[in-house]
């Protein structure tokens, strides 16, 4: 029997998130890279996502552009994504900020919603659809170590994202639904898809964010759901 929506929220997955603090300390960031070179600057930006000052959190979010510049996955992307998944429950991610981050809708939104959007976008960049497009241009996406690492992180990321599928904040909830749908591109998580169909249909019908609606439509079609949704 397919998982219920509640079971997706409460269920147990084999992958579990490491403590963000431990992950930060045990990752050798000097051996990793992003769009502008060494990832040694990434830990400082990640810790500042939970700074007490809203403008510092906004600047830290903008800094994340380095680990996925132009939709590219780097060696620093997977550990950064796991850290972000691990801090979603921090209360300092709840207040709205203005980050002016071009890759996300960022006008006066909860940082938690934006981080969920960011995680979804990372998952989308290593999806089967992107892999097929890359193959047409001669790129073997699935063979890249940084892609392998991010794909391996998807169960742990889903474990964090699913906790917000019924959040009181509509923006957070819809961001979580879309992010979860994108993460569920992972074949090992496919059993959770049926439970997410009704929430994705709700996003498609009612979300004011057209990016969310576009993602929801693509996810539904990719899972074989036929319109009208």
Image: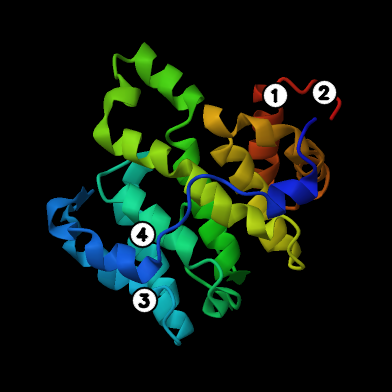
Label 1, residues with CA under 10 Å away: few <14, some 14-19, many ≥20: few
What secondary structure is found at the residue carrying circle 3?
A: helix
Label 2, residues with CA under 10 Å away: few <14, some 14-19, many ≥20: few
> At x 60% / y 62%, what residue is drawn?
113
Q: How many marks?
A: 4
In the rendered image, the quadrant that contains the C terminus is top right
Q: Distance between the residues labelled 2 and 3?
A: 43 Å
One can see residue 155 in this view? yes
Q: Are marks 3 and 1 in contact (CB under 8 Å)?
A: no
Q: Distance between the residues labelled 2 and 1?
A: 8 Å
Q: Distance between the residues labelled 4 and 2?
A: 36 Å
Rendered image: mark on residue 48: 3
> At x 47% / y 63%, what residue is drawn?
86
Q: Give the percent coordinates (x, y) of residue 214.
A: 66, 37
> At x 54% / y 27%, what residue is drawn?
187
Rendered image: mark on residue 221: 1
Figure coloring = rainbow
Query: What residue does disc 4 label?
Result: 64
């Amino acid at each position: 029997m397919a998982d219920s929506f509640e079971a997706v929220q409460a269920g147990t997955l084999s992958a579990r998130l490491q403590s963000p603090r431990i992950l930060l300390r045990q990752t050798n960031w000097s051996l990793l890279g992003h769009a502008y070179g060494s990832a040694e600057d990434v830990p400082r930006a990640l810790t500042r996502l939970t700074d007490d000052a809203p403008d510092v959190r906004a600047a830290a979010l903008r800094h994340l552009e380095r680990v996925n510049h132009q939709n590219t996955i780097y060696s620093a992307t997977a550990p950064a994504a796991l850290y972000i998944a691990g801090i979603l429950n921090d209360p300092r991610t709840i207040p709205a900020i203005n980050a002016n981050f071009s890759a996300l809708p960022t006008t006066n939104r909860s940082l938690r919603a934006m981080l969920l959007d960011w995680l979804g976008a990372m998952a989308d960049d290593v999806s089967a659809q992107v892999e097929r497009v890359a193959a047409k241009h001669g790129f073997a996406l699935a063979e890249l170590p940084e892609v392998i690492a991010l794909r391996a992180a998807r169960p742990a990321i889903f474990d964090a994202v699913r906790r917000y599928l019924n959040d009181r904040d509509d923006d957070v909830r819809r961001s979580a639904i879309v992010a979860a749908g994108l993460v569920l591109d992972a074949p090992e998580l496919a059993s959770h898809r049926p439970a997410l169909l009704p929430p994705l249909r709700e996003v498609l019908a009612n979300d004011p964010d057209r990016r969310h609606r576009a993602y929801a439509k693509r996810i539904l079609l990719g899972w074989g759901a036929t319109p009208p949704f």
